Image: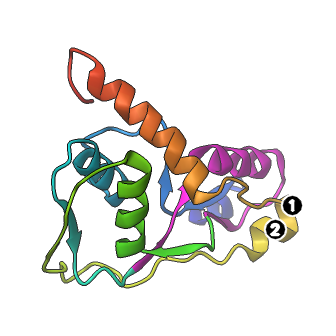
Amino acid sequence: MAYHRAHSMETRIVRIFNTYGERMRVDDGRAVPNFLLQALHNQPITIYGDGSQTRSLCYVDDLIEGVIRLMRSSYASPVNLGTTDEVTMIELANRIRALCGSRSEIVFKPLPEDDPRQRKPDLTRARELLNWEPRTSLDDGLAKTITYFRERLRQPTGPK
């Protein structure tokens, strides 16, 4: 925004919230890839904290559509892109375990001090300015991501 103001440059600013989907690195380190990798290997699924903290997970195709719409607009102020559908970490772990057909147990470890309890974007600008809403359900997006992860894990070069 400072560059836009100082140089009168045409800019677009997107605030990307938690996103998941195909092409994620298997060893990415975030909740969705971690849970998927553990579930697909029938290893314990590790949840940090008591599992009550929430995330709003947006499927990558929906995010890209929002970015394209923003780029085609003339709006220069920040726009949040994500989803307002919240899921607790325990719900996410259980959904992933079920969708993978996994026998993984769920284990709990201490929550890092800087881990937020909630991440939920305000999508008012995206809705009003871009006529944008995420359309992919969590289960549909997870199913596509699981298929991708299974294929990646079968490749002889290992996960990337």
11 drawn magenta: no
* In front of the other: 39 or 130: 39
Where is residue 81? Give x, y as percent: 64, 62
Q: Which residue is mark 2?
A: 127
Q: Nearer the viewer, residue 89 or 65?
A: 89
Q: Which residues are magenta?
A: 54-82
Q: Is residue 99 above or below residue 144?
A: below
Which secondary structure, mark 2? helix
Closest to the observer: 88 or 9?
Answer: 88
Q: Residue at x 84, y 54 (%)?
A: 74
**Residue 28 visible to an observer of this rendering:** no
Q: Secondary structure at mark 1?
A: loop
Q: Is residue 50 visible?
A: yes
* Residue 59 within the magenta-colored segment of the rendering: yes
Side (left or right) of 149 relative to 8: left
- Look at mark 1 in the image and give the residue it sits on: 131
Q: Looking at the figure, which quarter contains the N terminus?
A: bottom right
Residue 5 figure quarter: bottom right
Q: How many marks?
A: 2
The answer for how far apart the CA atoms under marks 1 and 2 are is 5 Å
Amino acid type, callout 2: Arg
| Residue at 77%, 72% in the rendered image | 125
Residue lying at 35% horizontally and 74% vertically, measured from the top left: 90
Tag 1–tag 2 contact (CB < 8 Å): yes
| Location of the C terminus (image quadrant) | top left
